[in-house]
Amino acid sequence: MPDARRTDAVLLLVALVWGSSYLAAQTATAVLPVLVVLFARYALSALACLGLVAADRRSGPWTRDEIRLGLPLGVTQAAVLVVETYGVAHTSAANAGLIISLTIVITPLLDRTGRSGGLPPAFYAAAGVCLLAVGLLMSGNGFHAPRLGDLLMLAAAVIRAGHVALVGRLAVGRAVRPLRLTTVQTLVGTVLFLVPASGDLPALVHVGAVGWAQLLYLALFCSVFAFLAQTWAVQRTSASRASLLLGTEPIWAAAVGIALAGDHFTPLTGLGATLLVAGTYWGQAIERTHRARSAKAAAPWAPSGARGTARPATADPHVTTTPAPSAIAEDPACPSTTTTTPTTV
């Protein structure tokens, strides 16, 4: 298989794995309390990450920036996951994956890093299409009061967008290694959920093979594997192509929900899903073009040596750290060859 096709296949696999995470979380929370699921997911991810760090003896000691960034980002990441997991427990896996994709159009409203001036009016039109789409998704078989799970997923999208913006703000000018930063965040999440989940931890003994399979899938595949595979693939393609492929996550979420969970789309929710995917792609394209124009306009005034290394604007807020591809300049330059964008464990 040619390198380009192999890279595309890996990125699509990452999007598929992340899209399937909503059904996996929904299944796990059907047999275990939400806080126990979160603790187990974080703890298993932390153990895997620590094992990978220990195996990489050439990477040197931990840096102060990796710990300083990992601590607050671990807290905000945990906030995203707790709202998201409670949300997916009260809505369909398809709706969860589609609504959380609103992060793509909410994040630019909060993050001005690498962009001058306000967003173009067309961006707000795209955001309006997305809001209409969410209303249709929440309608189910007819218009009624929004369901709790859908509202929680909407809140999770807002919190995740804030997490993304915070990462962009804190990471400017700092060199951090992806695996180390992710390890700190998983350790923070493990500690945060240990006490709240402690009363129900004995339930893990009786969860059975299927339950443990769901937890291991969430931790090892939807977190550790997807992160490492995404990092490897983005090194070998452009930010725009990676964004396009990773942005198929909500499509996979809907497909997995329909195929495996028996989720049903009425004409209204089907129209909402179509509008949401179209609106997020449209909004992302507008913001990416505006960011590139801002970078180009600022280029003549950039200090010598400050051009050429840029952070890609990935379509999916799960992404923790991506080395900057050449020929793409969408975010401000960073002196390191590695820059930081957020992930979800």
Image (spheres, grey):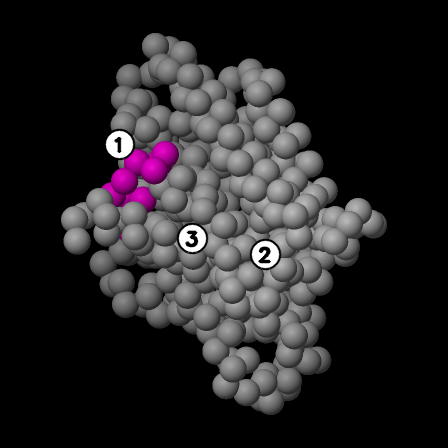
Where 306 sits versus 231, above or below? above
Q: The disc labelled 3 sits on which kind of residue? A: Ala
User: In terms of secondary structure, where does tag 1 sit?
Assistant: loop
Q: The disc labelled 1 sits on which kind of residue? A: Ser
Where 249 sits versus 131, above or below? below
Where 330 sits versus 235, above or below? above
Categorize mark 2 by other alpha carbons within 10 Å: few (<14), some (14-19), many (20+): many
- N-term mark: 1 or 2: 2
**Which mark, by number, is residue 94?**
2
Could you tell me residue 298's position as x and y percent? 41, 14
| Marks 3 and 2 in Cβ contact (< 8 Å) | no
User: Do we see residue 163 in this rendering?
Assistant: no
Of discs 3 and 2, which sits in the foreground?
2
**Residue 334 located left or right of residue 266:** left
Image point (31%, 54%), residue name: 10
Residue matched to label 1: 326
Range of the magenta residues?
A: 232-241
Where 15 sits versus 202, above or below? above
Q: The disc labelled 2 sits on which kind of residue? A: Ala
Cα distance in 3D space between marks 3 and 2 = 14 Å
Residue matched to label 3: 15
Of discs 1 and 2, which sits in the foreground?
2
Cα distance in 3D space between marks 1 and 3 = 23 Å
